Image: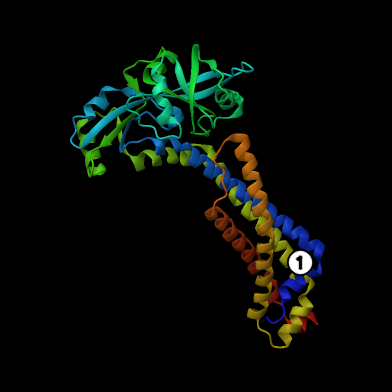
Amino acid sequence: MKYPLGWLQLSHRKLRLAIALAGIGFADVLMFMQLGFQSALFKSSVILHERIDGDIFLVSPQSSALIALATFSRRRVYQALAVEGVASAHSIYIGFGLWKNPVDRSTRSLMVLGVNPVANVLDFPGIEENLARTTIEDVVLFDEDSRAEFGPIPELYDSGELVITEVGQRRVIVGGLFALGASFSADGNLITSDLNFLRIFPERNPSEIEIGVLQLEPSVDPDLVQQRLRQELPEDVIVFTREEFINAELSYWQEATAIGFVFTLGLIIGLIVGIVIVYQILYTDVSEHLPEYATLKAMGYRDRFLLQVVLQEALILAILGYLPALAIASGMYALARAATGLPMLMTLTRAGSVFVLTAFMCFSSGALAVRKLQAADPADIF
């Protein structure tokens, strides 16, 4: 391999090389976007779960995900306090209401969370310094990372202007900002006190909640407390540890919806497209240079050496096609993040994963293309 035969063969037809790199880059960008959207889906769906300060969570067995939480009796939360190892218990109300844009008066659904402002269990930027304001009637906190369709609320609030609008049929005042972010479940979010939540949703039964949050005593085994709770509480609640609570949400989006399947299918399609493109390029290259390869075989070079040449071409194609795709995908991530508010970020793990898939794509194509070369007989060719 003193001379870079693979590179010399590829660069001999520059237009064909450019077309090949464009095809590989397209396949890589497709894989990047599928992985990016899939990751954004899963990450955004559990941001709330990860930021609730609790060790054990109670939910209704009829609940399937955050967007479809059924209610259960708040009495179960109080009963849990009697179980050994439970230090405190809290309730979270969750509902979806129509927010009226204070600028253009358009409406859009957002998620509303009601919590006890004195015993806060939410850990979001801006919550600690602003949540006490929700003790005032009809004061809410607005998610500054919500989609732009809800109006320029952060800008209006930061300018000192009193932001007054409606949620459902209730007049509310924005008393502060926090940062949560949009997700596939909700484009925007509000947090307020439990009393204000019930004012916004007057049809709700105050004794029915969506999530019970239990904080355990220090050095207590959560699994042991979970077993005690399952023995003491009726079967109208499910007792989750933190990890189970998060995994249940992820499982819903992965298995119970078509979205997870669609993203996985898109990734597979991108990989197949890339394999076909690279195979066509390498197969054509091998076919055109078959006499030269036959000459090398007649001179005593073994199939292993010729395979190295083809795989060298595959590696060059993988690297040269991957690098611009990485740059393009990073830019598209930024555009998608700005347009949707979803947490689409280029991570080192994802970049490495796509490069591995690209290398697999090219080497697989090279291995298929070299089969024609291995079957070549110098006597037949000449």
Q: How is colour applied across the structure in the image?
A: rainbow
Q: Nearer the viewer, residue 202 or 272?
A: 202
The residue lying toward the viewer, choosing from 63 and 123, is 123
Q: Residue at x 61, y 46 (%)?
A: 33
User: Considering the image in quadrants, where does the N terminus appear?
Assistant: bottom right
Q: Residue at x 67, y 54 (%)?
A: 325
Residue that appears at 48% across and 38% down: 253
Residue on which the image places disc 1 = 284
Q: x, y percentage for residue 193? A: 39, 21
Question: On screen, 185 above or below 365?
Answer: above
Q: Given the image, on which type of amino acid does mark 1 rest? A: Thr
- Please state if 266 lies on the left or on the right of 216 as rendered: right
Residue 21 picture quarter:
bottom right
Asked if residue 87 is positioned above or below residue 96 in the image, the reply reads below
Q: From the viewer's side, name the closer residue of 368 and 315.
A: 315
Residue 265 visible? The answer is no
Please tell me how crowded label 1 is: few (under 14), some (14-19), or many (20+) other residues with Cα within 10 Å.
few
Q: Is residue 282 visible?
A: yes
Quarter holding the C terminus is bottom right
